[in-house]
Image (tube, helix red, strand yellow):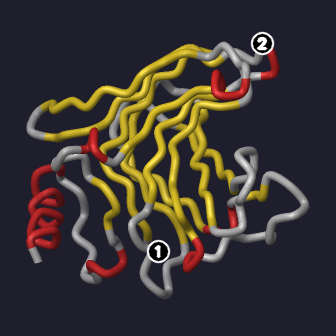
């Protein structure tokens, strides 16, 4: 119930449009309660790459968010930095996609989903989205996610999801993305 009240307050505080069905917007993380305990940051250095960066948790105008910054480099077969949240439970039945509230440096970023069938480190489902300097809601239907390899199902099953990550990926660039909310719809 407290999460529902906090969500309703966030709608009012941030000028978001009220949608009658709150079940349409189950939230995973809104960065207000100890985000450093759930989110993990890592780079391609785990496999020999040279990308670098960090995630910090900030509050601005009463809104808490995670900021991921860094330099993505494809040198040495690398090419990513990411902030990942392991899910304590799968999304509710009937969930059809991932919802984010983000802003950034007018670049393309990605959401990576891992599921019970993504056993190897390089297996995931990926969907891209663009950010602007202004806060905006992004909705990515599960049908927009592509499997990273032929051994995975074509579309991820919500009941099998184990983690969600925001990723700067695939090309040499400077990354800066702020993430205020992550959830499902």
Q: How crowded is mark 1: few (under 14 residues within 10 Å), some or many (20 or more)?
A: some
Residue found 46% across the figure and 33% down from its top = 41
Residue 144 picture location, percent across and down: 69, 62
Q: How crowded is mark 2: few (under 14 residues within 10 Å), some or many (20 or more)?
A: few
Seen in the image, is 93 located left or right of residue 3? right
Disc 2 to disc 1, C-alpha distance: 35 Å
Name which quarter of the figure residue 46 lies in.
top right
Give 96 or 52, whichever is nearer the viewer: 52
For residue 110, side relative to residue 49 (left or right): left
- Compared to residue 32, the image places residue 130 above or below, namely above
What's the residue at 53%, 64% (across, down)?
162
Task: Tell me which residue sits at (38%, 55%) in the image.
Answer: 182
Quarter of the image for residue 63 reads top left
The answer to which of marks 2 and 1 sits earlier in the sequence is 2
> What is the residue that sits farthest to the right in this orientation?
150
| Residue closer to the observer: 117 or 172 | 117
**Which residue is denoted by mark 2 in the rendering?**
75
173 horizontally vs 67: left or right: right
Picture disc at residue 90 = 1
Q: Residue at x 34, y 71 (%)?
A: 25
Question: Where residue 127 sits in the image (x, y, percent)?
Answer: 65, 52
Q: Position of residue 86 (x, y in %)?
A: 45, 56
Quadrant in which the N terminus is drawn: bottom left
Helix, strand or loop under label 2: helix
Split into 4 quadrants, where in the image is the C terminus?
Answer: bottom left
């Amino acid at each position: 119930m407290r999460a529902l009240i906090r969500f309703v307050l966030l709608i009012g505080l941030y000028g978001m449009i009220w949608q009658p069905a709150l079940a349409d917007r189950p939230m995973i993380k809104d960065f207000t309660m100890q985000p450093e305990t759930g989110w993990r940051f890592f780079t391609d250095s785990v496999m020999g790459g040279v990308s670098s960066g960090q995630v910090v948790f900030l509050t601005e105008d009463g809104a808490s968010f995670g900021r991921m910054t860094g330099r993505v480099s494809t040198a040495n077969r690398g090419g990513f930095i990411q902030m990942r949240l392991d899910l304590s439970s799968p999304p509710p039945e009937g969930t059809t996609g991932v919802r984010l509230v983000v802003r950034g440096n007018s670049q393309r970023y990605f959401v990576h989903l891992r599921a019970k069938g993504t056993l190897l480190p390089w297996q995931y489902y990926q969907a891209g989205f663009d950010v602007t300097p202004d806060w905006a809601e992004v909705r990515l239907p599960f049908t927009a996610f592509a499997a990273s390899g032929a051994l995975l199902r074509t579309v991820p099953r919500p009941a099998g999801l184990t983690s969600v990550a925001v990723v700067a990926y695939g090309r040499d660039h400077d990354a800066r993305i702020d993430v205020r909310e992550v959830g499902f719809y």
